Image (cartoon, grey):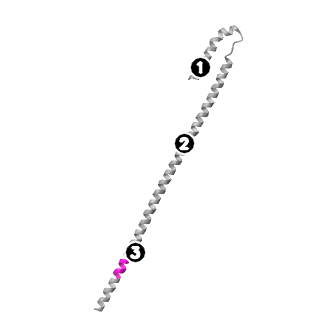
């Protein structure tokens, strides 16, 4: 009987030992699972922040490009206005009083045509 009790005690000890190992293993696995889940959450947040930052940078670049295009358009418009003014000044210089009175009669229609063309350019 003593032998039987010794075996039984030994079996109980082994069962307790086995239970402790299961609990320890479960705790380790659970800790690892939580750590992995935390890492995944952090990675997702980092990816989301990186994506938002990228979108903001693209929006800023687009704004810069739009501003550059607007500035280019403004400078082109200013250059065209300057050219138009120079052409108008040339037309004004060309349209003067004719030196001969005979030219005045024949050139009067040409001067009026030039003035009308210039007025059309300004309004259109």
Q: Secondary structure at mark 1?
A: helix
Q: Residue extending furthest left?
A: 1
Quadrant containing the C terminus in the rendered view: top right
Q: Please tell me which of labels 1 and 2 falls first in the chain.
A: 2
Q: Circle 3 is placed at which residue position?
A: 24
Q: Residue at 47% x, 59% y: name it.
A: 43
Q: Secondary structure at mark 2?
A: helix
Compared across the picture, whether 66 is left or right of 7 comes to: right
- Rendered location of residue 78, percent (x, y): 62, 31
Asked if disc 2 and disc 3 are in contact, CB closer than 8 Å, the reply is no
Corner quadrant of residue 94? top right
Q: Please tell me which of labels 3 and 1 falls first in the chain.
A: 3
Q: Is 20 within the magenta?
A: yes
Q: Circle 1 is placed at which residue position?
A: 119
- Rendered location of residue 4, percent (x, y): 29, 89
The segment highlighted magenta reads 14-21
- Mark 3 closeness class: few <14, some 14–19, many ≥20 residues within 10 Å: few
Image vertical order of residue 22 relative to residue 68, above or below: below
Is most of the magenta stretch helix, strand or loop?
A: helix
Q: What mark, if any, has residue 63 been given in the picture?
A: 2
- Mark 2 closeness class: few <14, some 14–19, many ≥20 residues within 10 Å: few
Q: Please tell me which of labels 2 and 3 falls first in the chain.
A: 3
């Amino acid at each position: 009987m003593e032998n039987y009790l010794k075996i039984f005690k030994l079996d109980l000890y082994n069962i307790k030992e086995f239970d402790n190992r299961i609990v320890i293993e479960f705790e380790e696995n659970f800790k690892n699972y939580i750590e992995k889940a935390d890492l995944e959450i952090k990675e997702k947040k980092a990816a989301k922040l990186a994506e938002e930052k990228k979108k903001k940078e693209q929006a800023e670049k687009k704004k810069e490009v739009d501003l550059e295009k607007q500035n280019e358009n403004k400078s082109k418009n200013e250059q065209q206005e300057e050219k138009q003014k120079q052409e108008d000044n040339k037309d004004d210089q060309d349209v003067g009083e004719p030196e001969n009175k005979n030219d005045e009669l024949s050139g009067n229609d040409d001067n009026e045509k030039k003035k009308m063309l210039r007025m059309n350019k300004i309004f259109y």
